[in-house]
Image: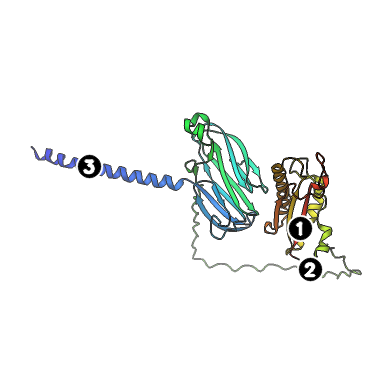
Amino acid sequence: MSNRTYELKNRKPFLLFTKQCLALAFFLLMSISLCAQHGLKAEYYNGVNFDDYVTTNYVGNIDQSWDNNPPVPGLDPHECSIRWTGKLVPQTSREYVFSARVDDGIRVWLDDRLIIDQWELNDLGLFQGKIYLEAAETYKIKVEYFNALREGEIRLLWSIPSAEQSWYEYFFEESTIPIPEEFFFRPDERKAPKQEIAEEVSNEKPKPKAKPKVTPQPKKKPVIVDEPLPEKQVISRKVSNAKEAEKYIPKNIAFEKGKTIILNSSMDELDLFAKFMLDNPTVNVSIEGHTDPVGDADLNLKLSNDRAIKVANHLVKEGVDGKRIKAEGFGGTRPLVVPKKGEYYPANRRVVFVLSGF
């Protein structure tokens, strides 16, 4: 055996080992890079309208619920707002049905197109939006959420087409699932490099700046005002007891029949009450929803609770702190008038405001 043949024979295991090491290193680097890209950027704020910034975090997807334990330290679990941003890359071209199971408000944008808009108090509602997406295309996604009054929950879901489901999923599992982390990518936050400006160096001494010419101005004659200007009238709604507050409590809150939509005729009273609450920051309110005891008890209870929450939501929108508001429905369990069989009494369908904290 020649020396060259022996040398090549001994070099092969070394070359093979080197290639394997390089391949492994490349695979690890790619894996780390891909893992670092998946997920969304989450910005947390105290207050229902992104008032006080708390922190920024990165999450895999949007699927959270809590009661008294906030998702991040320092966040008020009962009155907060969160904004998620990033990119969404679908694997198939089709119409996607996005769903949001949320308590309380949510907005979802894809490439600046608003597909879900439910920015109000909700007791764990499910809201949907549809949009056609192309496979492998990159779409900017932004999700905004707020929670007020008690526990919080938000789940961003989408539907799985029946053609993509296994027989087991088709018959035994839900077709709507949280959007998996693998479809999300963090936003590109790389900044452009700063341009350095080279300063010219000169040996010449700087010339003294010329003093600006000052043109004397004629003295203005004093203006003599015979009468004082009228002061802006400020209406005070501060009160010291429940009797004084009685005139600000809404008496005629009405809704569309069988719905939670507040009639325009009730808005003036609600707006006046919101101003009263803002002028009296120590006062708290319990909003009670009531219906007739006639009909399905469970439906009446849900309707009364949803109406109370709707009124509370309007006050929050007007600037009242959600911590000062409690909303609860009692259905037909507390009628003012006990009806005869088959009869209705409009007086039983009402919203009651109970104040405390004077």
Q: Which residue is mark 1?
A: 354
Residue 341 occupies quadrant: top right
Identify the mark at residue 275; answer none if there is no mark. none
**Residue that protrudes farthest toward the left in the picture:** 1
The quadrant of the rendering that contains the N terminus is top left
Question: Looking at this view, is 343 or 170 the one in front?
Answer: 343
Q: Is residue 180 left or right of residue 309?
A: left
Q: Is residue 234 visible?
A: no
Rendered view: 29 above or below 229: above
Cα distance between the residues tagged 2 and 3: 90 Å
Find the distance from the CA under tag 1 to the CA under tag 2.
65 Å
Q: Residue at x 78, y 40 (%)?
A: 257
Look at the numbered disc 3 and give the secondary structure of its residue.
helix
Q: Amino acid at mark 2?
A: Gln
Percent of width and height locating residue 266: 81, 48
- Residue at position x 58%, y 50% in the image: 83
Please name the amino acid that badge 1 sits on. Answer: Val
| Disc 2 target residue | 217
Mark with earlier residue (2, 3):
3
Give the percent coordinates (x, y) of residue 135: 50, 33
Q: Residue at x 50, y 43 (%)?
A: 184
| Residue designated by label 3 | 15
